[in-house]
Amino acid sequence: MPNLRLALSQIDPWVGDISRNADEVVRWTKQAAEAGAQLVAFPELMLTGYPVEDLALRRSFVEASRTALVELAERLATEGLGELPVVLGYLGRSERDVPRSGRPAGSPQNCAAVLHRGKVVNRFAKHYLPNYGVFDEYRYFVPGNQLSVLRLHGVDVALAICEDIWQDGGRVTAAREAGAGLLLSINGSPYEHNKDDIRLELVTRRAAEAGCPLVYLNMVGAQDELIFDGDSLVVDADGEVLVRGPKFEESLLILDLDLPAAADPTDGLLLSDGLQLVRTDLGGEALPAPAEPVSPGIAPQVSDEAEIYQALVTGTRAYVRKNGFKSVLIGLSGGIDSALVAAIAVDAIGAENVHCVSMPSRYSSQHSRDDAAELARRTGLNFRTVSIAPMFDAYMESLGLTGLAEENLQSRLRGTLLMALSNQEGHIVLAPGNKSELAVGYSTLYGDSVGAYGPIKDVYKSLIFRLAVWRNEEAVRRGETPPIPENTISKPPSAELRPDQVDTDSLPDYDLLDTVLDLYVEGDQGRDTIVAAGFDPEVVDRVVRLVDTAEYKRRQYPPGPKISAKGFGRDRRLPITNRWRRG
């Protein structure tokens, strides 16, 4: 059987930075060439970054992508890399206008291309366009209608883009009909907890359907709320996992595959779903297996807590760096939420770039002040204390506030102080709100919701504690100082806005609350269904009411990394003005 040495570039493209992304293609292609690769692949929309959202509707951006693609092909040849075929994603357009009722004008496409010997030798567009969850590709793109097959060194390689293998039929079935020896899919598949198992099952099933090995190349990094975890896969037709890339790490995966020799299908054949076969012959004689085949093997899997924590670090690091900031600012209360956010920030960008402020009021306990200072000591981050008591007293003297208004004033003073320091010193403020609080509106607008990014926005409170415990245990395993004081983890959660206040004064126990929230938010189960599952009707009614009436607060909260199947914002889109309360 002929052998093909593949290089899979599991890397991080930056949205909108076409020049940088092109440089990365050249840099990683050089590494692939040095490793003896005969075909190198890059992720979906590599040249523009992913997702591009409404940038796809700007003709100037589309044309910049198309022009850069041609220039990149020429540059690769100029730098001595022209003989190595390169497969990568880019933003293109249909050569003819495609009528799209109710959609913006133009015909942009989510495309991939093959670059070889200084030319763009093949272009094709994504066939299936996802329009669920975080995806809105029907808004932007028109579909492609061809199956591109590369003949290289005696092997036929069929090409696909992400959703093409998530849907039944299409390019998977067409690859079998075309007699392909390998199906290569380039992807921009966002991270969700437990999605790795779903991907593995999908890729295994599609390889069997295609009747050949399947390569699933995914990007890493993050873009706004979305995180990309890599976890690239190569599975043979019998379902055996040959290669699995690391999670959340850029990596060049080099592997040798023994593949069936190419047959002689006829170009232009009409395949499943109306796909037209387009074969591009890149030449090269069939090659035997090398004396010492290479394979990156299977990256070790990690615990749920380790995976989620790394996802949060990846999202935070990307948001800060890609938006041009060097440092962050956090209000450090001594509570579990701000402590975990501080630990994430330290791991993401380094303790020297993390600035924290303790802002005690008359109700702040001494143990919380001590816990905040202790975390700063353990991690080495920058720490200062600025009391809000004088500001609070001045407001109270003028307004005479009581009850909830008095409590919220403290939070809003802290938010104002953080934003003032952000303006003065140039830090980006990280908001410490978690998913449990956001779900039920247990947060103060223009107070603890202040910030440009919320690292734990999609993390339930019960998981916050598990992550804090895991991070400390991981530090011990490495021989390091655990970053989060034990007292911060063990004490009852409290906003400390009135004497002896604890969260359970206002909310159910977090384990119970989070279970109901998971059913209502992630599961989309109605009130009656949740009660029928055995939960107290009064608790369910209370939680559902709180969630339904807090939508206006969630809309004003900053973005944060999505780790669940249904994060607030991109995934869950409910009307703010909404009278539906049961069903």
Image (cartoon, rainbow, N blue to C red):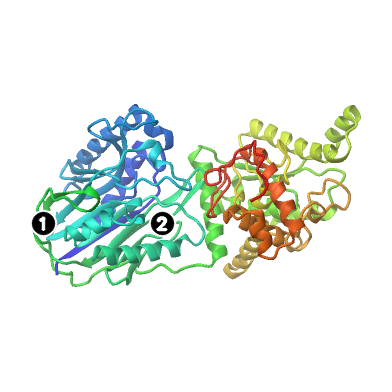
For the residue marked with disc 1, what is the amino acid? Pro
Residues 143 and 360: in front is 143
Checking the image for residue 230, the label placed there is 2
Residue 541 x %, y %: 73, 53
Q: Residue at x 77, y 35 (%)?
A: 413
| Contact check, label 2 and label 1, Cβ < 8 Å | no
The residue located at (34%, 38%) in the rendering is: 141
Give the answer, above or below, for where 422 lies relative to 498.
Answer: above
Task: Using the image as rendered, state which of residue 37 and residue 234 is in the foreground.
Answer: 234
| Percent coordinates x, y for residue 13 in the rendering | 39, 45
Q: Quadrant of the N terminus?
A: bottom left
In this view, the mark in front (2 or 1): 1
Looking at the picture, tell me which residue is in the foreground, 571 or 56. Answer: 571
Q: CA distance from mark 2 to mark 1?
A: 34 Å
- The residue beneath circle 1 is 265
Asked if residue 294 lies left or right of residue 18, the reply is: left
Q: Where residue 22 is drawn, which disc sits there? A: none
Residue 464 in view in this figure: no
Q: Helix, strand, or loop for circle 1?
A: loop
Residue at 34 percent across and 47 percent down: it is 44
First reached walking from the N terminus: tag 2 or tag 1: 2
On the image, the x and y values in percent for residue 521 come to 60, 52
Q: Identify the amino acid type marked 2.
A: Gly
Locate residue 570, reporting x and y percent: 52, 43
| Residue 234 in view in this figure | yes
- Category of crowding for the residue at label 1, using alpha-carbon neighbours closer than 10 angstroms: few (below 14), some (14–19), many (at least 20): some
- In the visual, does 467 lie left or right of 375? left
Under tag 2, what secondary structure? Answer: loop
To which quarter of the image does residue 294 belong?
bottom left
Which quadrant would residue 3 be assigned to in this image? bottom left
Label 2, residues with CA under 10 Å away: few <14, some 14-19, many ≥20: many
